Image: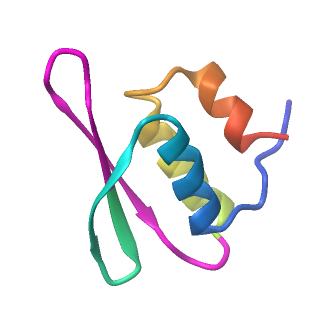
Amino acid sequence: MPSLRRMTGRDVLTAFKSLGFEVYSQKGSHVKLRRLDPNGGQQTLTIPNHPELDTGTLRAILRQASRYVALDTLHQHFYR
């Protein structure tokens, strides 16, 4: 099984921006990303913009994102 990459908050933000998400707001070091789905609904993710994300935090972000993005696509960006 492939392992998660060690990523910074900026790396994660870049990956989700390439998937169509845009920065919606920021409070402190937490950035909210948002995109509209084809039905007009909003898809929102919250990403901590930290120098290095713990693997548990990264797994939680991926679990949250898997509601909106296919797992194959997420694996391309986040796994080795």
Q: Residue at x 16, y 15 (%)?
A: 39
Q: Residue at x 77, y 40 (%)?
A: 79
Q: Is residue 35 above or below residue 22?
A: above
Q: Is residue 77 above or below residue 70?
A: below
Instruction: Locate the N terminus and report the quarter of the image it occupies.
Output: top right
Q: Position of residue 40 (x, y in %)?
A: 13, 23
Q: Position of residue 77 (x, y in %)?
A: 69, 39
Q: Is residue 36 above or below residue 4?
A: above
Q: How is the image coloured?
A: rainbow
Answer with left or right where residue 27 lies relative to residue 7. Answer: left
Q: Which residues are magenta?
A: 33-52
Instruction: Locate the C terminus and report the quarter of the image it occupies.
Output: top right
Magenta segment: does it hold 40? yes
Answer with left or right where residue 40 lies relative to residue 33. Answer: left
Q: Tell me the quarter of the picture where residue 71 sits.
A: top right
Q: Position of residue 3 (x, y in %)?
A: 82, 43
Instruction: Please name whichever residue, 60 or 79, is drawn nearer the observer in this view of the structure.
Output: 79
Q: Residue at x 44, y 37 (%)?
A: 65
Q: Tell me the quarter of the picture where residue 25 sits.
A: bottom left
Magenta segment: does it hold 17? no
Q: Position of residue 48 (x, y in %)?
A: 46, 69
